[in-house]
Amino acid sequence: MPQSDPDSVAREALRLIGPDPQNWVPEREGIDHNVVVVGGGQSGSAFAFALRRAGIGKVSVIDAAADGTKAGVWLTSARMHKLRTPKSLPGPELGLPGLGFQAWYEARHGAAAYDALDRIPRLDWAAYLDWYRKVTGGAVRYGTRLVRIEPADGHLRLHLERNGAAVIESTRKLVLATGFAGSGGASVPEVLQELPKRFYAHT
């Protein structure tokens, strides 16, 4: 049976783990971010949350899409009606059941409806990821494209394009969570296309 307050389980899970730890990374003058995550989808959102939970502050997530409805494949180019993976596989919840797809779905449709699912419907997965970003406080800066990565003195200088304007920001570390574009295939910025395949991973 759906709950009258569908976010109560997630809020309780977050309450029990306590607030994000204090940022333990020392400040460095002239560095805008400790970590920039490129891509605000499933992996990028999970990375950002995990970094914050590890006590790493000044984490920023960027995405080239204009907004959440145009980001990733689930609402844009994906053709399947259901995900191919089993519904029981862990997602971006980082071991917190209250943040998982099952808890989200059952709070809205009931346990019997979840039991009746064979695979997760694509549009429900997109709605769940949107909710996950909101409930974990994972703000994404949409309309921000990574154009070039420039090594600097102990950090990286990122050349960005934000809503058509050139912007430069600095970061200590960079996570590429750019996912899959079109009908499949890794979406790797041109500057990194010669990176050895052993450094690639996907969900």
Image (cartoon, grey):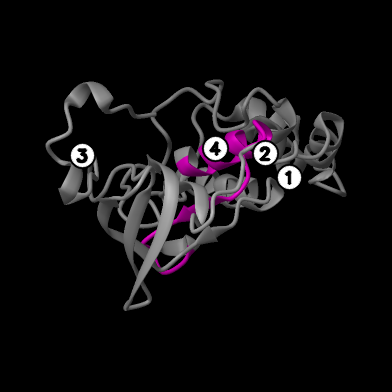
Q: Earlier in the sequence, mark 3 or mark 2?
A: 2
Residues rendered magenta in the picture? 44-67
User: Image quadrant of residue 83?
Assistant: top left
Looking at the rendered image, the quarter that the N terminus falls into is: top right
Q: Earlier in the sequence, mark 3 or mark 1?
A: 1
Image x and y of residue 184, in percent: 22, 41
Looking at the rendered image, the quarter that the C terminus falls into is: top left
Amino acid under disc 3: Gly
Amino acid under disc 4: Ala
Which of the labelled discs sits on residue 46, or is there none?
4
Residue drawn 56% across and 46% down? 129
Which of the labelled discs sits on residue 105, or is there none?
2
Q: Which of marks 3 and 4 is nearer the N terminus?
A: 4
Q: In this view, does 196 lie to the left or right of 174?
A: left
The residue beneath circle 1 is 108
Q: Which of 156 and 136 is in front in this view?
A: 156
Q: How crowded is mark 1: few (under 14 residues within 10 Å), some or many (20 or more)?
A: some
Amino acid under disc 1: Arg
Question: How far apart are the alpha carbons under marks 3 and 2?
Answer: 29 Å
Magenta highlight on residue 156:
no
